[in-house]
Image (tube, grey):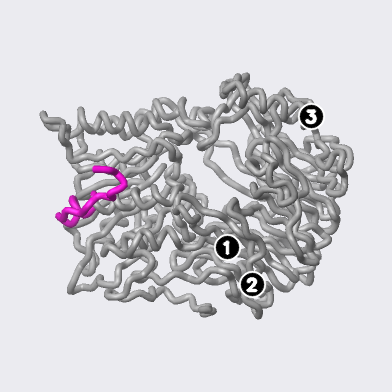
Amino acid sequence: MNLDDSHTTDGHGSPDQATPFHDLEDFVALPRLSGLAMNSDGSRLVTSVATLNPKRTGYATALWDVDPSGERPAHRLTRSAEGESGAAFLATGDLLFTSARPDPGNEADDAGKQASLWRLPARGGEAELLHSRPGGISSVATAAHADIAVVVAEVLAGASGEVEDAERRTARKDTGVAAILHSGYPVRYWDADLGPGEPRYFRLEANSEDEPLVPLAEGIGAGLRDSHPEVSPDGAMLFTALRLPEALGSQRSALARIDVATGERTVLVNEAGFDAAPGPVSPDGRTVVVICNRRTSADTFPRTWLALLPVQGGELIPLARDWDRWPAPAAWLPDGSGILVTADDDGAAPVFAIDTTTGAVRRITTDAAAYSDISVSPDGTTAYGLRSSYLYPAEPVRIDLGTGDTTRLRGPVERPELPGTLERVETVGEDGQPVKSWLVLPQEASDASPVPALLWIHGGPLGSWNAWTWRWSPWLLAAKGYAVLLPDPALSTGYGQHMIDRGWGQWGGAPYTDLMAATDALVQRADIDESRVAAMGGSFGGYMANWVAGHTDRFTAIVTHASLWALDQFGPTTDAAYYWKQEMTPDMLRDNSPHHSVGNINTPMLVIHGDKDYRVPIGEGLRLWYELLSASKLPANDDGTTVHRFLYFPDENHWILKPQHTKVWYGVVEAFLAQHVLGEEKELPPELGL
């Protein structure tokens, strides 16, 4: 097993050596690691690894044990065709997880079709089923120092208990009823139709046969959607975001405390100016971290900061309020002196420590990597987490909190060989703002042999290119000989509040000019062929691709995925219409909508959209496609032929998740780019049946 901990920016492939990125079959078969949980004494780490199923139509996830010392190789803990996820340790050392695997003691039990709660004893042996319910179990959260767990499960809104919930679900299923009656907003979220079930919290009584799941704070209903409980170390309290309805279909997020023993609920923070969500609770159980997200408007820019709050309520105490980054709290130091956080920063997401007394911020990790799933050892000297960058996917690491040294642990997944190299490049925007990018170069790029290039625009827009992503892999294009530029224009996180503010409400302004400045610098390189450059993006990146298409002819092809096209249409139909209504005025919608420039589009475009996309509804793709054919400078010919293409996925959402569709997606993109960038004809994926 390769245990090299080098941070080199060189890839390992060579022009005549195939890597997993040279063949889509090999790429989709690469195992994908995610999540990291540590037990209470710091002696065990558990992660999840997703691998391709035998039919190659999906992924199944298994739990693996990772040695925190890095001495022993990782070993697999669970095996089932259905997979396991959501690992969480009880204070006793038992491991809880969710899985749709059937109960080995009752193979005929139909409960296996829904995710149930399972326990793997610390002493070893086989996993045992703790509880299953008709609506399944979503997740579980545990207390650090008490044998207490809080379960998240869905219940039909009108059901008074588990028996009635099961009866109503059976009645809907048997009669073929899928209708949902709504009395509030929203009704959809990303790719899920909301209702008639609602998430609820339950206290787990693992040894109770009568009522293993005890309801907590009944009556909250839909207010817990997209919320995650934070349990105090002693298991006495949990903290949660609570979504509260407002006028005109809007909503805000308050912070609530729930007594785990009694279910009593208390709202602690409920402010009009910002949404509140819980972070971790202090080791002494007295203080909870509060994540504050400023509510936006056309003139109010987004901002994230942290505060400390006594668990019994009181005044919020801002923490490092003047720090010009957006922190995500991860874990307290055991003595309560500080909090470990991650934050986007200059194309990475390092680990930082914030002093809880002074608010002073200290960067801990020093490499250009993104960290997540951070836990701290009981003695406070070491942290564990996952690390990734554009050089390698997520891997478990040990972090020395004194020196910042990071050591790669013996995880279950190898680093894949890369077909090129990675560089950090920089240019300057029109207003003098530095604009930084990652540049992926194929091995064959040289001054003597310049290569074609692809401008790849990230989504969000509040985000940055800083971590490995399986969905948007530049290495697949590098394997085909393209240089791929990954720029962070205005609205990107990790470069200070000014980088957000300069693009807010002006999507077609600084974000666009920053991208053009980055492209200008790219094509000045001797190893880039200026005559063969394309652009691509998804979501907000797709919006920008559409905007680019209507405002410049410099690109030879444009790929737009899940893209916003007509903002006046998009706003009321997205799954969070209230947010867009408060963010953009009618003038902003008009001035920043790409569809007004359709008559200027003179570049072949590949439009891609999934029908189950509720964030950017399919109407955007359908309208873009029709208007390209009817109103662009490259309309459909008299015989109906066109240079444009529309790749439609009836059963995919905002992302393309099925491995067979991933292959089709990249196969069509590659063929489209080959035709219009390289002047070559490449076969389309045979699965299209063309």
Badge 1: how crowded within 10 Å, few (<14), some, or many (20+)? many
Picture coordinates of residue 330 (x, y %)? 67, 57
Picture coordinates of residue 30 (x, y %)? 46, 63
Between label 1 and label 3, give the one nearer the viewer: 3
Return the disc, 2 or 3, that comes first in the chain's sequence: 3
Return the disc, 1 or 2, that comes first in the chain's sequence: 1
Between label 2 and label 3, give the one nearer the viewer: 3
Return the disc, 1 or 3, that comes first in the chain's sequence: 3
Q: Residue at x 32, y 49 (%)?
A: 536
Is residue 290 visible in the rendered structure shown here?
A: no
Picture coordinates of residue 624 (x, y %)? 30, 32
Disc 2: which residue: 399
Determine the secondary structure under disc 2. strand
Asked if the stretch drawn in magenta spans residue 674, the answer is yes
Given the image, on which type of amino acid does mark 3 rest? Gly
In the picture, which quadrant includes the C terminus?
A: top left
**Between 42 and 101, which is closer to the camera in this rendering?**
101
Disc 1: which residue: 371
Given the image, on which type of amino acid does mark 1 rest? Tyr
Q: Quadrant of residue 407?
A: bottom right
Q: Residue at x 31, y 64 (%)?
A: 478
Do tag 1 and tag 3 residues touch (Cβ < 8 Å)? no
Q: Residue at x 63, y 39 (%)?
A: 226
The residue stretch that appears in magenta: 672-690
Q: Quadrant of residue 602?
A: top left
Measure the C-alpha gap from mark 2 to mark 3: 46 Å
